[in-house]
Amino acid sequence: VQLQASGGGLAQPGGSLRLSCVASVSNFDYYAIGWFRQAPGKEREWVSCISSSDSTYYAGSVKGRFTISRDNAKNTVYLQINSLKAEDTAVYYCAADRSIIVSSMETPNAYDYWGQGTQVTVSS
């Protein structure tokens, strides 16, 4: 499984970005996809997850501003980020797993496959 994250860039506070994670895999719809982020000097932080059945989950710090969705026909998961804040600045990674459970979706080690990351910088 190969994952390609894209869509990051420089945005102003209050702005929006849409990140994409494209997977090179058959049976993409069997996989849960998670998004994590890592700011300089900080640990990798779970942001959101969408299950194979389209259930969505969010970290409290992003709930209401981030929206995760998937298009199985395109093997793609999106992360829409609205009302950007400076503290959203980080490298954003997508990760995939076929057998993740809700209780472990926030744990990086629970995911078998990772993309390379895309940089999001929020600054005026």
Image: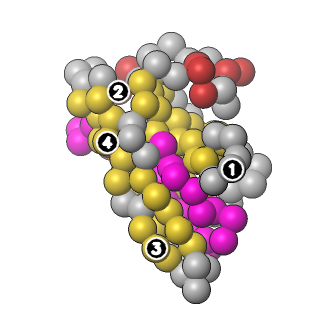
Q: Which residue is mark 3?
A: 10
Image marks 2 and 4: residues in contact by CB distance under 8 Å: no
Q: Which residue is mark 2?
A: 29
Q: Is residue 103 visible?
A: yes
Residue placed at 43% from the left, 31% from the top? 114
| Residue 105 location (% of width, % of height) | 63, 27
SS at badge 2 = helix
Q: Is residue 54 visible?
A: no
SS at badge 3 = strand
Q: Which residue is mark 1?
A: 41
Q: Which residue is mark 4?
A: 4
> Which quadrant holds residue 113?
top left
Q: Is residue 85 magenta?
A: yes
Foreground tag (1 vs 3): 1
Residue type at mark 3?
Leu
Say whether disc 3 or disc 2 marks the residue closer to the N-terminus: 3
Residue type at mark 2?
Asp
Q: Residues within 10 Å of mark 1 (few under 14, many from 20)?
A: few
View extreme (top): residue: 99
Say whether disc 2 or disc 1 marks the residue closer to the N-terminus: 2
Foreground tag (3 vs 2): 3
Q: Residues within 10 Å of mark 2 (few under 14, many from 20)?
A: some
Residue placed at 37% from the left, 60% from the top? 7
Q: CA distance from mark 2 to mark 1?
A: 34 Å
Residue 56 versus residue 3: which sits nearer the camera?
3
| Residue 15 location (% of width, % of height) | 54, 78
| Residue 92 location (% of width, % of height) | 51, 50
